[in-house]
Amino acid sequence: MSGADRPVRIGVQLQPQHAAYADIRRAVARAEATGVDIAFNWDHFFPLYGDLDGANFECWTMLGAWAEATERVEIGAFVTCNSYRNPQLLADMARTVDHMSDGRLILGIGSGWFERDYDEYGYEFGTAGGRLDALARDLPVIRDRWSRLNPAPTRDIPVLIGGGGERKTLRIVAEHADIWHGFGSAETIAHKHAVLDEWCARVGRDPTTIERSAGVSPLPGRHPESVADYVAGAEALYAVGTRLFTVGVDGPAYDLGPVRDLVAWRDERNR
């Protein structure tokens, strides 16, 4: 399947901060009922904005609960920090949630960036380059462990990698990812696609085997005039090859209005 032939998919990131778990559980059920393809959380130990000492819940424990609380939607972290867990253990955790969900897990993973998580939980922060080198080292370890687990994963668990670094991150994507998630305007994303395609050529990878993903949101710091602003943003990203579109939604209300519009747009696009 070429990149252009891929169906549009819609994801929602339910940010696990500033909400009771009951609010989050209801939100993932509503998201599934709305028709999203993927429900994501995130892998941080503290809120990223608002009250920085406010309520926040751990990523992978929550994914296990989501596996039992949902039936159709794919689930995953957006994204797991590679630094926080031994890769052999992470592989086993992912395999277990894969089975709990009947094959609906996506392993979203990145090299990590939120220094407070590292400092307060006792992980070495190091350098951005060092963390990327560790990600490149650990991804083959994860896949090797999957090949030796009993029972094996129910499927070839898709790996999503986020980030746009052109010297290291996109090379790692070309070598290891099934999905690439980028950030920025359609113009920026188009440029990153071109760089990723170049890396695929260098490592002997068919670039059409990597699904292209991006976030859809209003400009930082402002609310859209209407949920139609999200669809307009998605159209621009679609034109440059994006096929997976994810909206971040904060609690405790978890307003899914933009998600509903994008799901309707997806259905029109996929006819």
Image (tube, rainbow, N blue to C red):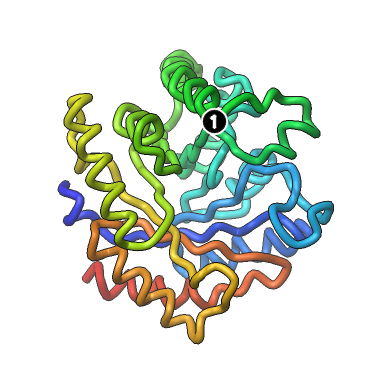
Q: Is residue 270 above or below residue 132?
A: below
Horizontal and vertical percent position of residue 157: 41, 34
In the picture, the quarter occupied by the C terminus is bottom left
Q: Is residue 137 above or below residue 43?
A: above
Q: Nearer the viewer, residue 150 or 192?
A: 192
View extreme (bottom): residue: 225
Horizontal and vertical percent position of residue 66: 61, 49
Residue bearing mark 1: 128
Horizontal and vertical percent position of residue 2: 16, 48
Residue type at mark 1: give it: Ala
Q: Give the total of numbered labels.
A: 1
Crowding at label 1, few (<14), some or many (≥20) Cα neighbours within 10 Å? few
Question: Left or right: 250 with respect to 235?
Answer: right
Q: Nearer the viewer, residue 71 or 227?
A: 227
Label 1 residue SS: helix
Horizontal and vertical percent position of residue 13: 55, 57
Question: Left or right: 55 with respect to 208?
Answer: right
Q: Is residue 184 above or below residue 99?
A: below
| Residue at 35%, 59% in the rendered image | 9
Q: Nearer the viewer, residue 224 or 27?
A: 224
| Residue at 76%, 51% in the rendered image | 56
| Residue at 65%, 41% in the rendered image | 114
Question: Left or right: 247 with respect to 196?
Answer: right
Q: In the rendered image, which quarter is residue 44 located in? A: top right
| Residue at 32%, 62% in the rendered image | 186
View extreme (right): residue: 53
Question: Left or right: 209 with respect to 116?
Answer: left
